[in-house]
Structures are given as structure tokens and as C-alpha cells.
């Protein structure tokens, strides 16, 4: 009984740590998008300065997972939870890395002439809301909500394709904007990758909750 109590306590600490990591990544993404749309380099620098916190939390998640594997030898649902966390933590760290790259672009473009970033801002809002919903689904072990989030990745992909075509067209017709638009295109690509990582997190939530592996099965979800 004492062993089970210790395991439960350690699993709860692990959940808290990975949610802190998720919260930091979510905040980094929102702050980075704010810095880009509001031309706020100070906010962008905050994103970069805070990246060490994300890295430290990822290391702490790894340490806690190893301790649980070695000392507690979890089984069944608890094992799936820890295994999922070992894969979710690096995804959250990569999301924060993409946020840092967006923040760097915000700094680079802060003194550029005004540009229409409405569609990129829309893409960022979808990515941010998907991440928040994915963390909530993970917290609640809500496989149904996770499946809905996976389907939303199509919104990100469609917007990326539209933005890509629009920016490439502008680079051809207005060569003087090529450098700026190339940077904006990279922002869109960062957001598209974040959508992929959120999808991966949601697939791991389904695995954690149902022991079902749904990776590479998005077509079945869309027709279900």
C-alpha cells in the first residue's frame, strides 16, 4: 500500500511538471505572436530570455520519468502515462523553440514598414488554441477531445498553403518585399510545425487513455 501511495504521489508530481512545461510553451507561443503582430521587440526578447526555464523543465520531466521507471516499475495505465510524458515533453520543448524563432523574426521585422499579418495572426491563434485544448485533454485523459484536436490540424495546413501561395506571389510581383515576406513565410512554417506537434501530443493522449495507437491513422478519424 505504501509503495502505491508513493507511486501516486510521484505520478502527480510528474503531471504537475509536464503541465508547467506545457504552460510555459503555450505562453511563449502567445507572447511571440503578440510581439510579431504588435511590433513589440521587448515581448520577443522576453520569449528568448525565458527559454532556459523551458529547457530546465524538460530536463526535470526526464529525471522524474527515469526515477519512476527505475524505482516504481509502473504497469498498465500508469506505464502508458509515463511513456506518453517522455514523448510529450520534447514536443513541448520544440514548440517553445519554434516560438523563439518567431520571436527572433519579430525583432528583425520591428523596424520594417507595416505589413498585413492578419492571416498569420489567425494561424497563430488556431495553433495556440489547439495547444491549450491539447494540454486540457491530456490533463483530463480525454481521448474524445484529443481526437477533435487532431482533426483541427487541417485548419492549420489549409491556412499555411494559402499564406504560402500569397507570399510567394507577393515576392514575385514586389521583389522589394522579398526579404520580409520570406521571413513571414518562415513564421507560417513554424506555426505549421507547431500544429503537427500538437497533433502528436493529442495522439499520445489517446494512447495514454485508451491504449490505442492512432498515429498515421488520421484518414480514419476524418471518416469516422
Image (cartoon, helix red, strand yellow):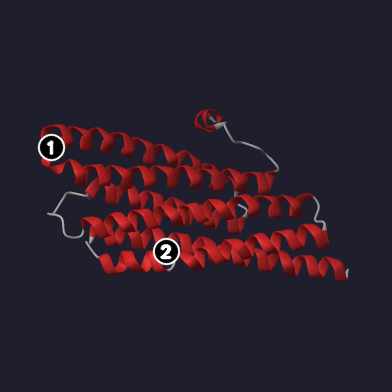
Mark number for residue 66?
A: none
Residue 70: quarter of image = bottom right
Mark found first going from the N terminus, 1 or 2? 2
Spot occupied by residue 5 in the image (x, y as percentages of width and height): 81, 69
Spot occupied by residue 168 in the image (x, y as percentages of width and height): 22, 34
* Identity of the residue drawn at 34% across and 54% down: 102
Residue placed under numbered mark 1 in the picture:
175
Residue placed under numbered mark 2 in the picture:
27
Q: How many marks?
A: 2
State whether residue 183 is above or below residue 36: above
* Identity of the residue drawn at 68% across and 44% down: 210
State whether residue 139 is above or below residue 119: below
State whether residue 168 is above or below residue 63: above
State whether residue 184 is above or below residue 9: above
* Identity of the residue drawn at 67% across and 48% down: 208
Q: Please state, as top left, top right, bottom left or bottom right, where the C terminus lies in the image.
A: top right
Spot occupied by residue 211 in the image (x, y as percentages of width and height): 71, 43
Amino acid at each position: 500500500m505504501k509503495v502505491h501511495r508513493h507511486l501516486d504521489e510521484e505520478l502527480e508530481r510528474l503531471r504537475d511538471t509536464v503541465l508547467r512545461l506545457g504552460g510555459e510553451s503555450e505562453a511563449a507561443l502567445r507572447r511571440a505572436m503578440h510581439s510579431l503582430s504588435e511590433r513589440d521587440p521587448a515581448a520577443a526578447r522576453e520569449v528568448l530570455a525565458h527559454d532556459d526555464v523551458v529547457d530546465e523543465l524538460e530536463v526535470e520531466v526526464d529525471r522524474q520519468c527515469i526515477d519512476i521507471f527505475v524505482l516504481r516499475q509502473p504497469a498498465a495505465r500508469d506505464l502508458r502515462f509515463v511513456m506518453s510524458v517522455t514523448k510529450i515533453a520534447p514536443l513541448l520543448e520544440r514548440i517553445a523553440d519554434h516560438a523563439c524563432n518567431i520571436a527572433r523574426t519579430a525583432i528583425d521585422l520591428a523596424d520594417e514598414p507595416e505589413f498585413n499579418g492578419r492571416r498569420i495572426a489567425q494561424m497563430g491563434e488556431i495553433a495556440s488554441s489547439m495547444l491549450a485544448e491539447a494540454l486540457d485533454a491530456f490533463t483530463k485523459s480525454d481521448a474524445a477531445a484529443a481526437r477533435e484536436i487532431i482533426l483541427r490540424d487541417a485548419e492549420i495546413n489549409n491556412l499555411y498553403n494559402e499564406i504560402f501561395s500569397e507570399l510567394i506571389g507577393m515576392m514575385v510581383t514586389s521583389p522589394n518585399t522579398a526579404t520580409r515576406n520570406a521571413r513571414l513565410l518562415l513564421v507560417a512554417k513554424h506555426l505549421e510545425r507547431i500544429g503537427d506537434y500538437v497533433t502528436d501530443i493529442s495522439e499520445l493522449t489517446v494512447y495514454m487513455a485508451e491504449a490505442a495507437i492512432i498515429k498515421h491513422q488520421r484518414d480514419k478519424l476524418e471518416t469516422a
